[in-house]
Structure formats: structure tokens, C-alpha cells
Image (tube, helix red, strand yellow):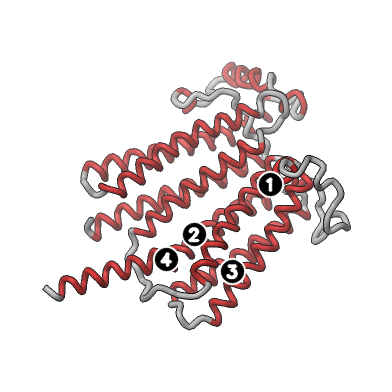
Amino acid sequence: MSASSSRSVRVWLLFVTFLIFTMVAVGGLTRLTRSGLSIVEWRPITGVIPPLTEEQWQGELQKYRQTPEYQKVNKGMSVEEFKDIYWWEYGHRLLGRVIGLAFALPLVFFVWRRQVSGSLAGKLVIALVLGGGQGFLGWIMVKSGLVDLPRVNHYKLAAHLSLALFLMGFLFWIAQDLRAASSKRRVTGLLPMLSVSFLILVCVQIFYGALTAGLRAGHMYNTFPTMHGSWIPQGIGSFGPIRDFFENPVTVQFMHRMLGWLTLLSSLVLGWLAYRSREINARQRLSLGLVVGMVLIQFTLGVLTLLHAVPVNLGSMHQIGACVLLLLALNNVHVFFRGAESRLRAELLRFGNSSR
């Protein structure tokens, strides 16, 4: 792949990464405004056209009136009030379709122009299939909130968010692979493996954040640093040894808090090791510094979100912060491993050419 082709593909992948990032942010706002259950049908093609007449709006509202959310939360909602939540969900679904086109059409073009081939093409086809599955998984999640309880199943919410973040990170990683490497040598010691461990910790923390959102656990124990005066609140363990960690709102919020502390302390350790290390280059040092700074911001946002019982603005900023932190942690692993490997391959190739 030529340098110009590599640059074009990389810009495209970063653009799609940004679109997915935006999709996650809009999805968070849709959930926080309780708009996600306003459209009760999944119509991948015809659903592009929203209601255009008063009669069509009345028809959509009538369908919504059959749902548990209307009957238990929004009973008596007017058409105008319904439109407010409908447009959030419609925008979320429309953006998903836009992302699909923004990924699929350029992929076909790049393959046709032979700018994408081999293993790279295989990876991108996998991403395309997973993207299609993401839309179906989103409907499965919504459908779970149209049966008994006026909210979606928290496991399905976590799965839907996790797959979106995986796709975002997967495309971002590939885009970084196409970037000219800047690492001068492979770094030894603790920093590379601790960076991987930190990335795993961030992923687990985001998963627990999704469980917290799905169970609405952030609306209870809105004090900090203790949970209504207790470090370990009553109610932990009441669901059994395994289910408790995933279905008990008290335990889920407790785990989210503890993982937040662990993430903060781990980032400070990484920052301290980076400060003392003489092996890392400027790019690696900057990457670690950005991670530490983002953790401090995200931790603060988490505390404020909790203390104010998850208002829409803070809840949305906290979810966006999680996306930013994930990308920074992923980039941090990349600059310690793949950058060094790419540089090594380039040096070997240069050596081979000069010896001919």
C-alpha cells in the first residue's frame, strides 16, 4: 500500500471511529432522556422515514401507549411530549444507518481500487459484519424493555455498548497501524505490560458502568466517598455469590466505585513510572500523561454525576469521558507495542535494501 493510499484509508477509519464515538454519545443521551423505548418497531429500511402527518404521529403514540414505559412512567403523555423522546431515538437509529453506509461504501471502493486487500480487508469485513450485528443487538435490547419492566435488560445494554466500543477501538487500532511508526526501540520493564493491564481494567470498569446504568444503580447512594455513611453498605451479597456482582444494584454500584478508585490509583502508578523511566520516548511519555489526565477528569465527572443523581448533562459527559479514556488507553498500548514492532520491521527492510 502506497503512502497516499495508507493515509486515505487511515483518515476514513478515523472518521468512522469518530462517528461511532458520536453514536455512543447520542445513545447515552437517548437513555438518559428515557427516549430509547419510544419506537416500538424495528424497520431497518422503511424506518428511515419518520412520521410526517398528524395521523402518523398519533399512530406511533398509540403503539407507544401499549408499552410498560408509557403505562408506568409516561401515562397521559401528549403528542408534543412524545415527539421530544421520539426524535432522540430516531436520531440514534438514523446515525446507525449513516455509519453503516459511511463504512460499507468506502470499503467497497477501497477494495475495488486495491487500496485495501489481504489481512486488512479481512479485518474490515469482520468489522462490517459486526456492525450489522450491532444494529440487530440494539433492537434485541430495545425489545427487552417492551415486555414487563419500563427499562431494557441491563445485560443486553452492556452487550450493546460493549460491541459499539469494541468496534470503535478495533477501527482505531487498525488506523493506528497504518500510521508511520515513531517508536525508536522496544521498551522493557513494567510499563508495557502495565499498560495492557490498565486497558483491561478500563474495559471492566466501562462494563460495570453499563450495568450501573442498566440497573439505574446510580440513582441510589448519592453520597461520596461513603455510601450513606458506610464503606460497605447493607444489601451486598443478598443475590447470591455470583448473581450479586451483576444483578444487585447495591453491589454493582459498589463495584463501579471500587473499580474507579483502582483505575485512578493505577493511572497514578503508570504516571509515576513514566516520570522515572529513561527508556520511553516523547510520544510514549505524552501518551501516558494523557491517560493520567483523562482518568483524573473522568473520576471527577463520576463523582459529580453520582452526587447529583445522574443528571442528563453530567451522565452524558461521564459516558463520553469513558469513550475518550478507552481510546487513550488503547493508544497507549499501541505506542508501546505495535509502534516498536513497525519500527523494527522498517529498520530490517531498510537494512536489507542497503545490503543488496
Tell us which disc is closer to us: 4 or 1.
4
Sequence-first tag of 4 and 1: 1
Q: How many marks?
A: 4
Question: Which residue lies at the image location 51% right of the left edge and 44% below the top edge?
Answer: 164
The label shown at residue 292 is 3
Viewport quadrant of the C terminus: bottom left
Residue 277 in the image, given as x and y percentages of width and height: 51, 81
Q: Are marks 4 and 1 in contact (CB under 8 Å)?
A: no
Sequence-first tag of 2 and 3: 3
Of all residues shown, which one is farthest toward the front?
241
Question: Which residue lies at the image location 60% right of the left edge and 32% below the top edge?
Answer: 141
The label shown at residue 330 is 2
Q: Are marks 1 and 2 in contact (CB under 8 Å)?
A: no
Residue receiving disc 1: 312
Instruction: Tell me the CA gap for discs 2 and 4.
Output: 11 Å
Residue type, mark 4 in image: Phe
Left/right placement of residue 16 relative to residue 52 reads left
Residue receiving disc 4: 337
Residue type, mark 3 in image: Val
Instruction: Tell me the CA gap for discs 1 and 2.
Output: 27 Å
Residue type, mark 2 in image: Leu
Q: Are marks 3 and 4 in contact (CB under 8 Å)?
A: no
Q: Quadrant of residue 267?
A: bottom right
- Which residue is at the front of the view, 231 or 160? 231
The answer to whether 308 is drawn above or below residue 145 in the figure is below
